[in-house]
Image (cartoon, rainbow, N blue to C red):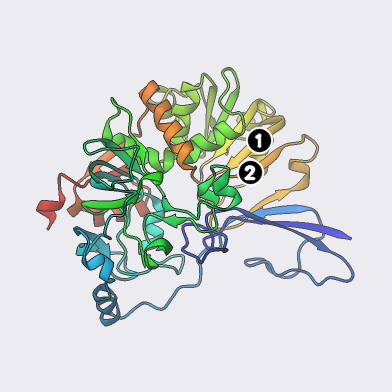
Amino acid sequence: MKNLIHCRIGPSTLHTPQPLGAAVMSYHCRALVQGPFLHPPFSPGAAGAPAPSLGVRVGLPSRALRLPRPARASVEKREQQVTMEEKAGQAAFGWAARDATGVLSPYNFSRRVPKDDDVTIKVLYCGICHTDLHIIKNDWGNAMYPVVPGHEIVGVVTGVGGGVTRFKAGDTVGVGYFVGSCRSCDSCGKGNENYCAGVVQTSNGVDYAHGGVPTKGGFSDVIVVNEHYVVRVPDGLALDRTAPLLCAGVTVYSPMMRHGLNEPGKHLGVVGLGGLGHVAVKFGKAFGMKVTVISTSASKRQEAIESLGADEFLISRDPEEMKAATGTMDGIIDTVSAWHPITPLLALLKPLGQMVVVGGPSKPLELPAYAIVPGGKGVAGNSVGSVGDCQAMLEFAGKHGIGAEVEVIKMDYVNTAIERLEKNDVRYRFVIDVAGSLGSAA
């Protein structure tokens, strides 16, 4: 019999609203046994029959099946279909995309009526993530227009329900990638809400607990969230630099903690020096680790070492440099979203070393068995982090003065920022000054 392992990190499970029981924001691997009595499994993106060797493919299809672009009349109709609960809620103002062009414009709507365990938050800052870009352009075929993006939210509490025990008016808080989960499944019971099948995304999610309405994110002046999914921002952190930590920060912090890549003296490799990578470097150094940035671009060497504090810089396209670093790293955090060969990266690991993939390449990443079996090496995925992870990450960031490197913008610059983000023209994260600009943008 011939064994073939298919692993997929795909947009069908990434930030995608699905009914309870569906797999959302989790990494799915199917062990498929191919023998004389079984037909070869269908593998999206693969051409022909599977190769007759043990291998792993990890990746995203280049583009999910698009939904038809809605007509303007259809979008306007949806905007008018507000539930009675929303009508009685607080008026809100933000910027929304109405169709797959992804162009954002001013948008008036209503937040839901706060419940007993809800917190009402005035949004101060909101980061712009690549996920926002994919959703507003309907790259994954799941956009529910009008879409108000944003899941890296920092704000101040303006009101709490009678049952809220953890927060009070005036507290500085954050809201990350999700605002709901079933709270009864195995993942939720173990404090891993981010892997719950019923997770509710902060933007463009389906809020099952409140009539199944689409959620609207932090590109707006106010948001209402159940207190369970709100985190406290420690005193002393710069709020604009804290916003990206609620997604990019916890996405790298969580797997570093889980896989023991937080021990002083260990050697960490960080692949890619972008929104996630630069934060991983900062966390690694704060843990007391030796950190090597691995990049295809030699121009980032000075930034990595002098500005971010990395110990070494490795050009992945230089065979001599790669050879010299073989077997030297305890772990690798791979943040790159573009296709790249991972077999050479695995050669950098020591025996029993661990590589964690947190980026989402559009083409499958090929992994031959010989790259992991002889050295007992592992490849894992990670999807953001739990509420507990996020709170612990913020406490650690507060203790060590860690914040993202950001470019703060006004809301009326957001469409230009999206265009620049598509070209990776940002160092390293755009953050919208929501409270300081929405009034004038209106």
Q: Quadrant of the N terminus?
A: bottom right
Circle 2 is placed at which residue position?
380
Q: Are marks 1 and 2 in contact (CB under 8 Å)?
A: yes
In-front residue for pair 220/129: 220
Q: Amino acid type of disc 1?
A: Gln
Q: Position of residue 428 (x, y in %)?
A: 36, 39
In the image, farthest residue toward the front:
162
Residue at left offset 58%, top offset 22%: 263
Labelled disc at residue 354: 1
Residue at left offset 62%, top offset 33%: 259
The part of the image, by quadrant, that contains residue 249 is top left
Q: Please rate how many residues cluster around mark 1, counting C-alpha atoms within 10 Å: few if below 14, some from 14 to 19, many from 20.
A: many
Q: Amino acid type of disc 2?
A: Ala
In-front residue for pair 393/297: 393
Assign a secondary structure to mark 2: strand
Regarding residue 273, the answer to whether it shows in the image is: no
Residue at left offset 26%, top offset 82%: 73
Disc with the residue nearer the chain's start (1 vs 2): 1
Q: Position of residue 268 (x, y in %)?
A: 57, 28
Regarding residue 146, the answer to whether it shows in the image is: yes
Q: CA distance from mark 1 to mark 2?
A: 8 Å
Left or right, 162 with reference to 313? left
Q: Position of residue 151 (x, y in %)?
A: 36, 50
Left or right, 138 with reference to 220? right
In-front residue for pair 415/259: 259
